[in-house]
Image (cartoon, helix red, strand yellow):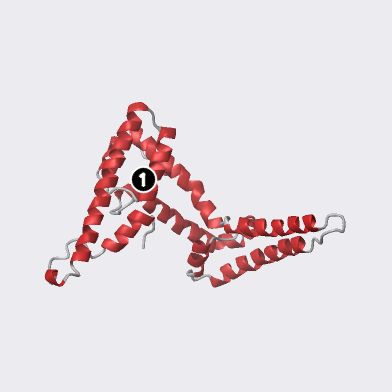
């Protein structure tokens, strides 16, 4: 299969020496989204309108704060917080009428709580990542069907984290049928369980090394077993 622009990041992730290529795909998209958000784009009216509306999730506001562009972040926080003030003031100023009584008051309270809940579910960076990430997932199945080299990469990979293993099972029937689907899931099963058992063995050896009877023993692959297992079980790359 001739490599096209959208296949490059998928192939790059499967070429990487990592415990989950899909986590690697997401990590790169996340880094690009953070760079975009803190780049010159924050001065563009279209982007500021979206960041004012969506804001950022807990994880990504921390990542943005860790960047060097504090002025850019301050400008985005300024207009976003002002929008929140306007919206919530308008809702809180809705006084119950004498005819509506407590029912109107409860409706106003629900509007405020619903608004705050919606803020917790919105994130400019998350949405920017998902726009590309869903296409990357679809590309995995397209490459599996048409590219023997990619098949070899997947079957020789270190497997996937638990979360993305489940995602592949969920998405595979939407893209593959019959023998293609069965062969894909069989390959995914093998690399997933082989990889998880391999890292689990490293974790066990790390634990055993703390026994005085194993003092001075070869640590083998146990030194980074904890972060690798965190990646496997929590789809987070420390």
**Apparent side of residue 237 relative to residue 38 in the rendered image (left or right):** left
Q: Residue at x 34, y 36 (%)?
A: 144
Q: Measured from the top left, where is residue 175 in percent x and y?
A: 42, 33
**Apparent side of residue 15 relative to residue 67 in the rendered image (left or right):** left
Residue underneath mark 1: 165
- In the foreground, 22 or 194: 194
Q: Residue at x 36, y 45 (%)?
A: 165
Q: Measured from the top left, where is residue 101 in percent x and y?
A: 82, 57
Q: Quadrant of residue 6?
A: top left
Q: Label 1: how many residues lie within 10 Å, few (<14), some (14-19) or many (20+)?
A: many
Residue 8 visible in the shown view: no
Q: Residue at x 40, y 36 (%)?
A: 172
Q: Quadrant of residue 84?
A: bottom right
- In the foreground, 196 or 110: 110
- In the foreground, 57 or 71: 57
Q: Measured from the top left, where is residue 125 in percent x and y?
A: 53, 57
Q: Measured from the top left, where is residue 151 in percent x and y?
A: 29, 38
């Amino acid at each position: 299969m001739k490599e096209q622009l959208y296949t490059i990041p998928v192939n790059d992730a499967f070429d990487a020496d990592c415990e989950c290529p899909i986590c690697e795909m997401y990590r790169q998209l996340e880094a690009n989204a953070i760079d975009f958000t803190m780049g010159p784009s924050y001065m563009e009216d279209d982007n500021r309108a979206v960041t004012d509306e969506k804001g950022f999730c807990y994880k990504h506001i921390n990542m943005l704060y860790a960047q060097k562009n504090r002025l850019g972040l301050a400008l985005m926080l300024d207009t976003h917080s002002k929008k929140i003030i306007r919206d919530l003031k308008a809702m809180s100023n809705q006084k119950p009428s004498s005819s509506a009584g407590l029912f109107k008051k409860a409706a106003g309270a629900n509007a405020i709580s619903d608004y705050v809940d919606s803020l917790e579910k919105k994130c400019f960076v998350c949405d920017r990542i998902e726009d590309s990430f869903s296409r990357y997932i679809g590309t995995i199945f397209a490459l599996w069907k048409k590219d023997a080299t990619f098949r070899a990469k997947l079957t020789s990979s270190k497997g996937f984290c638990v979360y993305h293993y489940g995602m592949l099972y969920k998405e595979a029937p939407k893209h593959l049928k019959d023998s293609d689907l069965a062969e894909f899931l069989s390959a995914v099963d093998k690399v997933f369980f082989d990889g998880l058992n391999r890292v689990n063995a490293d974790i066990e050896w790390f634990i055993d090394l703390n026994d005085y009877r194993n003092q001075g023993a070869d640590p083998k692959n146990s030194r980074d077993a904890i972060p690798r297992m965190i990646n496997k079980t929590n789809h987070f790359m420390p």
